[in-house]
Structures are given as C-alpha cells and as structure tokens.
Image (cartoon, helix red, strand yellow):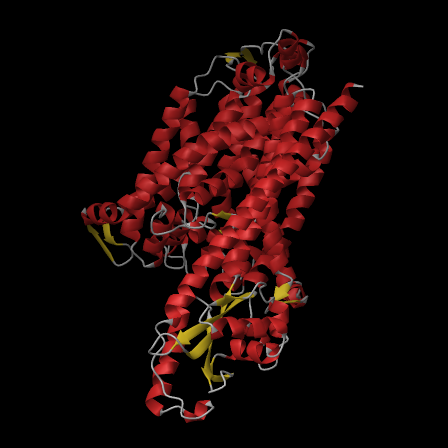
Amino acid sequence: MLRKKGLVKLAAASLVFAAFGIWIYSSLLGSYRSYSLENSLNKVTLFARTAPDFTLPGNGEDALLPADRFAIDNWIAGFAEVVEGGQILLLGSDENFNFYPVAADALPLALWESGRGNQVFEEAEQSVYYLLPYTFARSFSARELRSLDGVDPASVTSSMQAYLLPIPDDSGFDIRAAVFITVPEEGSRVFERLLRNLFILAWVIFIVIVAVALLARDPVTGYAVVFLFAVAAAFIAYPLFETFRLTFVQDGSATFDIWRDAVRPRNLQALWGSVQLGICTASVSTFIGFVFAFYIERTGARHKKLIGTLATMPVISPPFSLSLSVILLFGNNGLITNQLLGLRNFSIYGLGGLVLVQTIGMFPIAFMSISSILKSIDSTIEDAALDLQATRLKTFTSVTLPLAMPGILSAWLLVFTNSLADFANPLLLAGSYRVLSVEAYIIVTGRSNLGGGAALSLMLLMPTLTAFFIQRYWVGKKSVVTVTGKPSSRLAELATKPVRIALAVFVGLCLVFIMSLYGTILAGCFVRAWGIDYSFTLSNFSEALSRGWQSISNTVTLAAIATPIAGITAMAAALIVVRQTFIGKRLLEVLLMTPFAVPGTLIGISYILAFNRPPLILVGTAAIIVINYVVRELPVGLETGAANLRQIDKSIEEAAQDLGADMPKVFTSIVLPLIRPSFLTAMSYTFVRSMTAVSAVIFLISARWYHLTVQIYNFSENLRFGLASVLSTVLIIIVLSVFGLMQVLVRDRGMTAKTISR
C-alpha cells in the first residue's frame, strides 16, 4: 500500500515538473529564436548597406564593368567574415522591377531559382519593392538544400535562414538592386539541442531524487548508488561508447574495415604477447608483494616503516624512469653489463626485460593491497589452530593463506590489468617482442588512426574482463569473515627463525636492487651528460627547476584535489558493492573496474572525443585531468576496500544501525576506521599515480595545466637525462612528504594494530 502511494506521488510530481519544465523550455526557446532572428537581420541589413556602386547597362551579369565585377566579388567574399557560413546572391532590377542574378554563391542562387514564382518568394519581392526587408517565415532544412540542382551536398551542414533585402538607389526612394542572403542555423540548433538535453537531464535527475526519497528504504544509500551509476555512466561508459562507435565509422560512413584490420594475425599475436606479459608480471609481482607484506605485517621484523617506504618507491617515479635506469645499467652498452662485466651477447630487451621492469614498478600495488588484508586478519583464529597442535606451516597454509586469498587475487588482477595497460615500458624495452598497447599507441600517434588504435585498445578488455569474472566467481564462493567485533591486538608469529632470515635476505636483495636503480637516477642529477660526459655539475638543478616549476605546481595541485575525492569515493563504493544488494550491482562493479583495464591512450582519446563538445566541454581544463585521476585509480581503492570489508562481519554495522546510526554515521565511525589501511592505500595510490601519470594525461594537458611527468618525458626523449633526473628526484621527495602527512592526518585508532606473540 505504501509503495503504491509512493508511485502515485512520484507520477504526480513528475507530471508537475514536466509541465513546468516544458513551459520554461518553450519560453526560453521562443525568446532565443526571436533574439537570434533579430540579431541576424540586423547584421545582414547593415551589410547590405555596404554594397558597392555598380552599373547595369543591360540585364545580366556579363553587362557588369570589370571594376564593378571586382568590387562585387570582394564584397560577397567578405560576407563570410561577418556571418560565418553566410552566402549571398546579388540581384539586379530592370525597368519593370524584375529581379535577375548578377553575382552569387552557389547555394543562394540554386535556392532562388528553385523558389521563383511561388507565393512566398513573390511576397518577398513585393516587400523589397517597397524598400522593406523580408525575413522568410520558415528556415530551409539541410535535406531540402542538398536536393537543389547545382549544390554540392557535402557543402551543406545545417539548415538555413533566408532574407531578401533592398539596396536603394542614390535618392533612397527607389530600389536599385536586392540581395538574397542565407545564414546557417547551426548555432541556433546547437542551443536548442543543449536546452532540450538540459531539460531532459533535469527531469531525469528530479525523477531519480524523488523516486529514491519516496521508494528507497535507505535514501542515503540510494543516492550513493545513483551517484556511482552517474559517475560510471558519464565518465566511463559514455567516453568508451564514443570510442567504440568510432571504430565502426570511417570517412563519415559505417564500416567494419577497422575491425577487420584489428583482428589480423599480427595484432592477435600482439594480444597474446600482452596476455603473456601480464600473466608473468602479475604472478611474479604478487609473489614478491605477498612476501613483503607478510614480512612486514605478520613477523616481528624491525624497521617496518622504512622497508614499507622503500618498497613503495617504484610507484612514486614515472613509469619510464625505471626502464631508462635498466637500459643505462644493463643495456647493450650498459654500465654494468658492458663496462663492468664485459658482456657482449647479453640483451635486456624483450619479454625478460619487460617482466623485470614491470615487476619492479608494479609489485608495490600487490604489496599495498595484500598488506592491508594481512593486517586486518583476526589472529585469534591462528592462535586457535596453534593451540590445537597445528604446525606453523599448517596454520599458514590452512588459515592465513586462505583468509588472505581474496586480497591476493585482487592484487593479481590489479597488476595484470596494469600490465596490459602499460605502454611506456614496452615502448622502450620491448625490442622485437610485440604487445598490443604499443601497437595501439603507434597507430594513434604515428599514423593518426584513432579508430584503429581504439579498436586495438578495446581488444585488451577481453582478457581483463575474463580475469575479473574468474576472480569474482572464486571469491563469491568463499567466506572470509574474521572480524566479528573488536579485532585482536595480538599477532601469532608463524615464521620460524630460518624462515624469517630467508624472508629478510630476499626482501633485502630486492630493496638493494631497487635502490641501485634509483641511485642511477640520483647520480644523473650531478652528471653533465650521461654516457658521454660524466663530469660533476650542479647546473642541472637550476635549469630543471626554472623550466619545470609551473609543471611541478600544477601536478601537485591537481593530485591534491583528486586524492581525497578518490579515496572517499572508493571506500563508499566498496561498502555499497559488498554490503548492498540492488539492481545492476554487477554492471556497476564492472564499470568501476573497467578504467584499470583500458590503456591510458584510449582513456585520453575517449575523453577528448566525449568532452570536447556540449554539454560537457572539459578539454583543456583542470577538471578533466582531476576526473581522469579519480576514475583511473578508483579500481585500486574499490578492490582493496572490498577485500577488507569481506573480512568484517556486517553485524557490527547492523548493530550501529539498530542503535539509531544512519548510513553516513556508520560509514565514518565504524567502517572507515576498520578499513583504514585500505583507505590509506586508496589515497596513497591515487596521489602517486596522479603525480606519475603519463599515457592519458599526455592527451589532456594544456598550456595552462602542464604535467610534471610529461616534462620529464620530454627531457628524456631529448636525451636531457640530467634534467629528467632532477625532476624525478623532486617528484619522489614530494610524494614521500605527502605519504608522511597522510599518516599524520589519518590517525590509526589501533583497531588493527598487532603485537608479536612468539
């Protein structure tokens, strides 16, 4: 009964809003049309008064004197500068006041010839005879104009408004000539479409707001779901749809040629290369990330904060800086392989080198994701297993590892999709090994083939979505709830002393290798020309900072804006996806995860295509860069937050709701503190990726909003490695400082803190 009343109220409110909106729409549209016609009439009237003097001794354009012909042609050509797209037909008048063409553009001449003799054109001639300008009551459609003889259909892009204006003689009392003018209505049509779309959008928003308020049990949650769907539709689905549509359009007509070229054996081989690289990188990165996370979170290791900070260093730098370091150290003429070891047949290029560089750059993703999961596991379950005489290895394999598996699979998926989307590292290190992201990038940037590049990039969604659904299917069959109240503050030590030593050695070797790569970058700051002149210099600092100060300021500002938005949105999305059931839940989850699977070049192209025209013209603004940051990095927070929430018994939140807490209160006072590690991971990762983004941002930057990584890339491309090293070092310092600030601002309340019990 209550639901029926709610539907009746919704229908009544929708009808009232629609009636009110239609009245406003009609009033605004009528006022605009009147203003537009009056403005156009004033323009063409003023222009008609500037008609040059000419003599017509006979009835025809051949009778014009050469000087008059030259003046009239220049006058007609100048009209396009006054009214863009406007065209003119100059009409002479004989002794019987009959009009005939003197000089003309093709379109108004064809329109005049086709309309002579009908009632409307006769009324126009009579009006002009009395020196009164005439505005045709109706506009001429583009289809009607394209059908005229002598008109090139391709030259007609919009409907036309027509005017017939008198040109008086010297006395001002008789007519000397007339001018027939056509003015395109594209601007008016654009405004009408924009006004209509805004009205429809306002009506839909009103219906959604009222529907949620009247029908939803929890309006706040309903509004959150609607907001997430709106974000996913506007900034994920719509841009990708525009790009997908482009793959079926070539030279203005529908075609399958682009996809026929995309599925050629050469490109399918590149697709398999991308999948193979992604599997290898994700597997190795997840293993290393788990080792780091277990060593820090589940053992009594010392200097955990330092190890964690050093482990996250690879995601702080631009993605191509590690490739440059590897080439300089291990390339064909590398400092280590050639000059120190004297290796001649060793090559870092290919699958092995790519897996090495991508693993170094992406294992922190797995480390940060798994770390938050291991930290949240309630150790009382492990204690119970140990009390029942289970060995430490048995407890690890049967309790700890299964409970951490959702986080491990989430980390694997994130690294896998990140590897597929990467093009900067393969561009430098692939050699003869082919991956699809590079092929798409080359087609777009080298051949200016947006459709072909978009088709290849869209092909990368297939393996990503396959991995996503497999992971979701596996996680959905398991129950990993361990937090049913206040988590235990004790941590059972599962690693024996030999295992701890082995873990410490492995972690130490990885960190030494990573630091050696960054040592190369740091050394480059003080080298005049790497590989040519190794003499010491400080001039790189002054030149790099003076030329890159604006890009540093812009990058920090945009990243600081995007970080809290992405963090809070990701945690709210994780809460809704894990805890709520609603229509379209799977669709929303897939849409929110899609950006991580899409190459950055495709995201950049999609945003240019979607937001370079009404109703959202965002290209060239800071807003489109911030939106790109938030949307691109949302999957990381969503995955880590969802994996963390699956370990927390929902009865905690239900108890708070039973005590009168609404959903925002539950989220801020219970959920957010419990998933603080995931929240910090989401914000940290967003800030890092915003500071180090390349692929999508390179298409979206403008002169006002330049990006630091693009500046570094330009220096590297021009072999100014010293300047690139300085800016990379500055970037690392900034990100590390912000990491420390986040730890202070988002304080840990001790809910997930552990003390080691040996």
Tally of numbered discs: 0
Q: Residue at x 44, y 35 (%)?
A: 562
Residue 532's quadrant in the figure? bottom left
Image spot of residue 174 (x, y percent): 41, 77
Q: Residue at x 45, y 53 (%)?
A: 699
Screen quadrant of the N terminus? top right
Image spot of residue 64 (x, y percent): 39, 90
Is the residue 674 above or below the residue 317 in the image?
Answer: above
Q: Residue at x 52, y 79 (%)?
A: 106
Can residue 187 be seen in the rendering of this structure? yes
Is the residue 703 above or below the residue 406 in the image?
Answer: below
Image spot of residue 367 (x, y percent): 52, 32
**411 or 242: which is nearer to us?**
242
Is the residue 157 above or below the residue 188 in the image?
Answer: below
**329 or 183: which is nearer to us?**
183
Residue 692's quadrant in the figure? top left
**512 or 154: which is nearer to us?**
154
Image spot of residue 282 (x, y percent): 58, 42
Is the residue 251 above or below the residue 485 in the image?
Answer: below
Screen quadrant of the C terminus? top right
Taking 448 as reference, is 377 left or right? right
Taking 232 as reference, is 83 left or right? left
Can residue 295 be seen in the rendering of this structure? no
In the rendered image, the residue lying farthest to the right is: 1
Q: Residue at x 37, y 73 (%)?
A: 78
